[in-house]
Image (cartoon, rainbow, N blue to C red):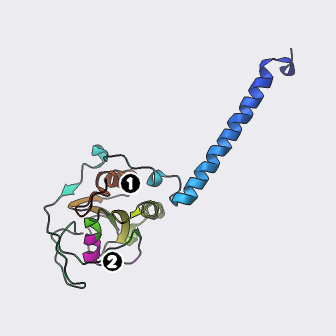
Amino acid sequence: MTDGDDPATPSTRPLSRRRALAGLGAGAVGALAGCLGGGGGGIESEPLPEQGDPALLEGVKQFPSEGADHVRQGTDIEYDTQPPTSGPHYGTTVPAGFYTEPKPLGALVHTLEHGAVVAYYVPDALTDEAEESLRAFARNFTGTWRSFVAVPNPYDDPEAPYTLTAWRHLLRMEEYDAEVVRAFCAEFLGRGPENPVR
């Protein structure tokens, strides 16, 4: 009996075509989702779990609140942590995004109060992969109360190439790790004191 005479052959061919078409359909849906979401297909665009993986967040430090008073734009503010995690701040915030120039700390602290995660990077240490990942996080988390901001670290001698901050929390990374950033976002994004949305 030849392959063409096998009664199973006709039914497997359409199944193979259906699988191929289903694969094409899934690819098209994925491409469309990437276009609409703007984040591509990496972990940066995946929905966040309810909590971050504790094993990835062992280095997170929590600090007492330095207050949340609004002060006049341009006021010099001394913060206890570098970068700051709470304290007096300006009335303005920094929109979600990847920035190549530093932003006022007073505005970044207000952004933290709104539930943002602010990632500080040392420009000389920034790899192409890290930049691409930070840009993807910033594209995917843009809400007023759950945004992601990446900015150059403004301090002269930062303790690490990458520092993640949320209201009263800080995590330093010697090497960029998107899984750690995602865990930090899962734990803190959208959970600022002004209007928690998660």
In this picture, residue 38 sits left or right of residue 18? left
Mark 2 Cα shell of 10 Å, populated few (<14), some (14-19), many (≥20): some
Of residues 26 and 133, the one drawn nearer to the viewer in this rendering? 26
Q: Can you say whether 143 is above or below 50 in the image?
A: below
Measuring 82% from the left and 17% from the top, which residue is drawn there?
6
SS at mark 1? Answer: loop
The residues colored magenta run 98-110
Report which quarter residue 123 is drawn in: bottom left
Which element is circle 2 on?
Answer: loop
> Label 1 is placed on what type of residue?
Asp
Find residue 77 and report its horizontal and vertical position in percent.
Answer: 18, 79
| In this rendering, position of residue 149 left or right of residue 79 | right
Give the percent coordinates (x, y) of residue 31. 60, 53
Mark on residue 117? Answer: none
Report if residue 156 is visible in the image: no
State the image coordinates of residue 194 (x, y, percent, origin top left): 24, 64
Sequence-wise, the earlier of marks 2 and 1 is: 2
Residue 99 located within the stretch drawn in magenta: yes
The answer for how far apart the CA atoms under marks 2 and 1 are is 23 Å
Q: Which mark is residue 103?
A: 2
Check if residue 4 falls in the magenta segment: no
Residue 77 seen in this snapshot? yes
Give the x, y percent position of residue 54.
Answer: 27, 44
Amino acid type of the residue tagged 2 in the rendering: Lys
- Between tags 2 and 1, which lies in front? 2
Residue 197 lies, with reference to residue 27, above or below; the image says below
- Give the residue at x 64% y 50%: 28
The residue identified by callout 1 is 177
> How many marks on residues?
2
